[in-house]
Image: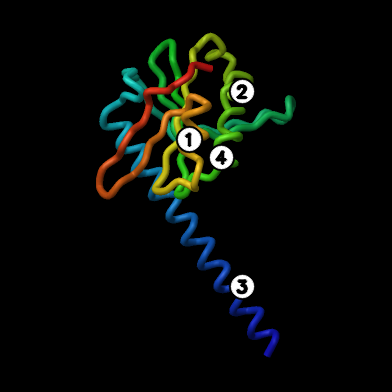
C-alpha cells in the first residue's frame, strides 16, 4: 500500500514539474516572439536578439543564463522570463548585469537595462521591479503589455 502511494506521489510530482516547465516555456516563447517582432524595449530600438544565452567559465567559477538578450551596439536589454514572477526573481535579476559583463567582457562598456516578464506576478513584485528600475512585460490574453517608464541603466 505505501509502495503504491509512493509511486503515485512520484508520478504526480513528475506531472506537476512537467506542467510548470511547459508553462515557463510558453511564457518565454510569447515574450521572445513579441520582442523579436518589434525589436524594441523601453523605447530603445535593438538590432539583434538572442535567447537562452548560457556560458560557464569553470576556470573562473562563473556561469550565467540569460533568457532574452537584445543588443544594438551600445545598449543591452537583459530580459528574464517566468510563468509567475516572484520577489526572489527581482533580486536575482539585479545581479545579472555584473555577471553578464564578467562572462562577456566585450560588452563591458555597454549600458544595460533590465526587464522581467511573465503571465502573472506575485503580490508586490511589480512595485519591487519598478522601484529597482526594471521594466515589466506582462502577458495579457493574446497581447503583451509593457511598463518601462522607470528603466534604470546598469
Q: Are marks 1 and 2 in contact (CB under 8 Å)?
A: no
Bin the neighbour count of mark 1 within 10 Å (Cα to Cα): few under 14, some 14-19, many 20 and up: few
Q: Is residue 47 above or below residue 64?
A: above
Q: Is residue 54 above or below residue 108?
A: below
Please name which of the two marks, 4 or 2, marks the residue nearer to the observer.
4
Label 4 sits on residue: 89
Q: Distance of mark 4 from mark 2, alpha carbons? A: 20 Å
Label 4 SS:
helix
Q: Which residue is drawn at the image coordinates 42% and 29% (left, top)? A: 135
Please tell me which of labels 4 and 2 falls first in the chain: 4
Q: Residue 34: x percent and y percent?
A: 30, 36
Q: Are marks 4 and 2 in contact (CB under 8 Å)?
A: no
Q: Distance of mark 3 from mark 1, alpha carbons? A: 37 Å
Q: Along the horizontal axis of the image, is 76 left or right of 86?
A: left
Q: Residue 132: x percent and y percent?
A: 53, 26
Label 1 sits on residue: 127
Q: Nearer the viewer, residue 150 or 24?
A: 150
Please tell me which of labels 4 and 3 falls first in the chain: 3
Please name which of the two marks, 3 or 1, marks the residue nearer to the observer.
1
* Quadrant of the image containing the N terminus: bottom right
Single out the residue that lies furthest toward the bottom.
Answer: 1
Total tally of numbered discs in the picture? 4
Please name which of the two marks, 1 or 2, marks the residue nearer to the observer.
1
Label 2 sits on residue: 103
Q: Which residue is drawn at the image coordinates 60% and 32% (left, top)? A: 64
Please tell me which of labels 2 and 3 falls first in the chain: 3
Q: Nearer the viewer, residue 86 or 70?
A: 86
Q: Along the horizontal axis of the image, is 128 left or right of 63?
A: left
Amino acid at each position: 500500500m505505501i509502495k503504491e502511494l509512493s509511486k503515485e506521489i512520484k508520478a504526480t510530482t513528475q506531472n506537476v514539474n512537467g506542467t510548470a516547465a511547459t508553462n515557463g516555456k510558453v511564457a518565454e516563447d510569447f515574450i521572445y516572439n513579441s520582442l523579436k517582432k518589434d525589436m524594441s524595449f523601453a523605447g530603445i530600438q535593438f538590432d539583434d536578439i538572442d535567447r537562452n544565452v548560457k556560458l560557464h567559465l569553470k576556470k573562473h567559477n562563473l556561469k550565467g543564463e540569460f533568457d532574452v538578450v537584445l543588443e544594438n551596439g551600445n545598449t543591452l536589454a537583459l530580459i528574464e522570463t517566468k510563468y509567475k514572477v516572484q520577489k526572489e526573481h527581482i533580486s536575482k535579476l539585479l545581479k545579472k548585469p555584473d555577471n553578464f559583463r564578467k562572462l562577456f567582457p566585450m560588452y563591458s562598456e555597454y549600458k544595460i537595462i533590465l526587464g522581467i516578464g511573465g503571465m502573472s506576478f506575485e503580490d508586490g513584485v511589480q512595485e519591487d521591479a519598478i522601484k529597482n528600475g526594471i521594466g515589466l512585460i506582462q502577458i495579457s490574453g493574446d497581447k503583451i503589455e509593457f511598463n518601462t517608464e522607470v528603466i534604470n541603466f546598469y
